[in-house]
Amino acid sequence: MSAITTEPSVLEGTWGLDTTHSKIGFSIVYMGVAPFETSFTDVSATLDAQGLRGTAKASSIDVSDENFVGHLSSPDFFDTANYPEIRFEGGELQRDGSDITLEGTLEVKGTSAPVTLTGTITDPVEDPWGNQKLGLTLEGVVDRNKLGLGWNAPLPGGGSMLADDVKLTASLVFVGASAS
């Protein structure tokens, strides 16, 4: 069994998010029948040897129903008027081959909760235009109540409309600084 190590050589310099080829989202079980999945369209992130930092504009949630967007933007959920951004800050990536673990803090509505994300990372590759790119996939679970997202409604037959656990997902492509 190999030891988990941080391999800073992969993360030399600062890597910026390629927003066209990246997706940051979440899913939550709705009414006990199926996960509701969505993502945010206005996101940013940087990755370096110290870790991963990112934001999502809370009002950029990708939902096609205007009334639903209004509810998600209200104080019941993201309260976008008072808290326009969702933030993540994680420390160094702990790497074992292509597998990674990242301990971090997620902040929603001014409330923070620890979260452990796991996933994979690729080694950098050069694209046809001379840019260095690498891929990072992450997922983890957080209790939404710990983030001030406590709205729920009881179901007539018992249970609640929304589960407590939220699955966080990210499929990220980063672009490295130009070679000197």
Image (tube, rainbow, N blue to C red):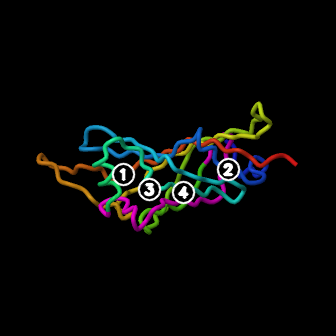
- Image marks 2 and 1: residues in contact by CB distance under 8 Å: no
Q: Which residue is mark 4?
A: 55
**Of callouts 4 and 2, the N-terminal one:** 2
Q: Which residue is mark 3?
A: 58
Q: Which residue is mark 2?
A: 16
Q: Residue at x 88, y 49 (%)?
A: 180
**Of callouts 3 and 1, the N-terminal one:** 3
Name the element at disc 1. strand
Q: Residue at x 22, y 51 (%)?
A: 160
Q: CA distance from mark 4 to mark 3?
A: 9 Å
Q: Residue 19 magenta-drawn?
A: no
Residue at the front extreme? 66
Q: CA distance from mark 3 to mark 2?
A: 20 Å
Q: CA distance from mark 2 to mark 1?
A: 29 Å
The amino acid type, in three-letter code, at marker 2 is Gly
Q: Position of residue 133 (x, y in %)?
A: 71, 40
Name the element at disc 2. strand
Q: Which residue is mark 1?
A: 165
Q: Does residue 171 sit above or below 72 in this rendering?
A: above
Q: CA distance from mark 3 to mark 1?
A: 19 Å
Q: Residue 79 magenta-drawn?
A: yes
Q: Residue at x 49, y 45 (%)?
A: 169
Indicate which label's residue lies in the foreground, 1 or 4: 4
Of residues 69 and 148, the one nearer the viewer is 69
Name the element at disc 3. helix
